[in-house]
Amino acid sequence: MIYLDYQATTPLAPEVAKAMRPWIDEAFANPHSPSRWGHEAAAAVEVARKQVDKALGFKGGSIAFTGSATEAINWALKGTVEKARARGSGQRNRIVTIATEHAAVLDTCEWLAEQGVDLTVLPVQRDGRLDLDLLARELDDRVLLVAVTMVNNEIGVTQPITGVANMAHDAGALMLCDAVQAFGRMDVCKGPDLVAMSAHKIHGPKGIGALWMRKGHEPAALIHGGGQEQGLRSGTLSPALCVGFGAAAKLAQDRCNRDYDHVEKLWRAAIQALGPGWTINGSTAHRYPGNLNIRREGVDAARLLADLRDIAFSLGSACASGSGRPSHVLRALGLDYRQARSSIRLGFGRYTTEGELIEACHRLARAAVEQEKLDA
Ligand code: PLP
């Protein structure tokens, strides 16, 4: 099995598994209970929180743990609207986002639109980048929040987050950045007021995410109960998952340059091994190099996936795969249905070897040529 689906999830780092082990095996105390064991668990959670905070490197805010980045994004969007309404600042009732966002952002925004929020979904340019002039024309004193993802999960294209945040602030609005595919892989651009992250994209465990919140801009609570996480997100925390997230964040921070250089080398090797006939979807200049989304005229990507079952790769996004719907991200770039259907995403990272990636690319290229011959 050659695993090339690093945008969907990443393998657990051995260091992370080791750090989590005692909190699974023996140390089962509730971190919110007043016993000595409870205090020890709470202390471990706080160390983890600091590790995530330090890896993000933002000042003037705090981290709350959530069950996933999807939860963090739902909370940021719905809780910010809720807070504005509760404060009577209801004239700011507009959210601006972009067409290539992950479903966690887009579907939540659409749900909010059904609840009366005024929603603007901006198109992107053919390279997947947001045109800041277009954004400037949309920003006024009715905008409450601008939500833009830093690294797109399907095509790896990066957005000018600091520029977007500055423009949002100039208009008196807040900015939410979905940093799921950026955090732990590259520096997250400074400026946003709310930042969503996920552990399982950085060799941490599944089932835990986090929301960084600038002081004073914490969203209203969505989950009520025991008052955990500053009274903003109730529910007993899992020390094992928190410790795993912290360890993964620290490891990613310590290895950041090494991991990035490795991924850049893999990117060049993959392009060379695939050979001619492939087109890269999205900007090649503004991107995270661990995501290679490519298409080839006439290829049926679903058939490639079926022919090469021992290579794990993806058709567009993992979330949309299997739904039969062409990717909304590829359509936003202006690709037609056939081009979207002939696109695949290869995702690689820390544990991918150059040898296995080259082998996979050679086999993909051969399988594509075979298809062409059969269809000719
Ligand atoms: N945002 C982006 C860009 C993602 O890639 C993902 C996961 O695929 C999410 C949000 C959701 O993260 P989680 O799996 O932690 O809910």
Image (cartoon, grey):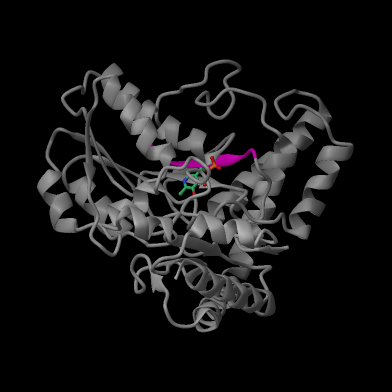
Q: Position of residue 81 (x, y in %)?
A: 31, 26
Give me the residue at 29% from left, 21% from top: 114
Q: How many numbered discs, if any?
A: 0
Q: Position of residue 90 (x, y in %)?
A: 20, 22
Of the pair 367 and 262, the residue shown nearer to us: 367
Q: Quadrant of residue 1?
A: bottom right
Give me the residue at 73% from left, 30% from top: 31
Q: In the rendered view, tell whether residue 272 sits above or below residue 218.
A: below
Q: In the rendered view, tell whether residue 168 sits above or below residue 334.
A: above
Of the pair 148 and 35, the residue shown nearer to us: 148
In the image, taking residue 237 as reference, residue 144 lies left or right, namely left
Q: Quadrant of residue 104?
A: top left
Of the pair 293 and 287, the residue shown nearer to us: 293
Predominant SS of the magenta segment: strand
Q: Position of residue 157 (x, y in %)?
A: 38, 62
Q: Position of residue 120 (x, y in %)?
A: 21, 38
Query: Magenta region: which residues?
Result: 207-216
Q: The C terminus lies in which quarter of the figure?
A: bottom left
Q: Is residue 214 visible?
A: no
Give me the residue at 67% from left, 41% from top: 242
In the image, taking residue 73 as reference, residue 47 lies left or right, namely right
Residue 125 belongs to the span the image colors magenta: no
In the image, taking residue 354 as reference, residue 126 lies left or right, namely left
Residue 208 belongs to the span the image colors magenta: yes
Q: Is residue 113 visible?
A: yes
Of the pair 289 and 1, the residue shown nearer to us: 1
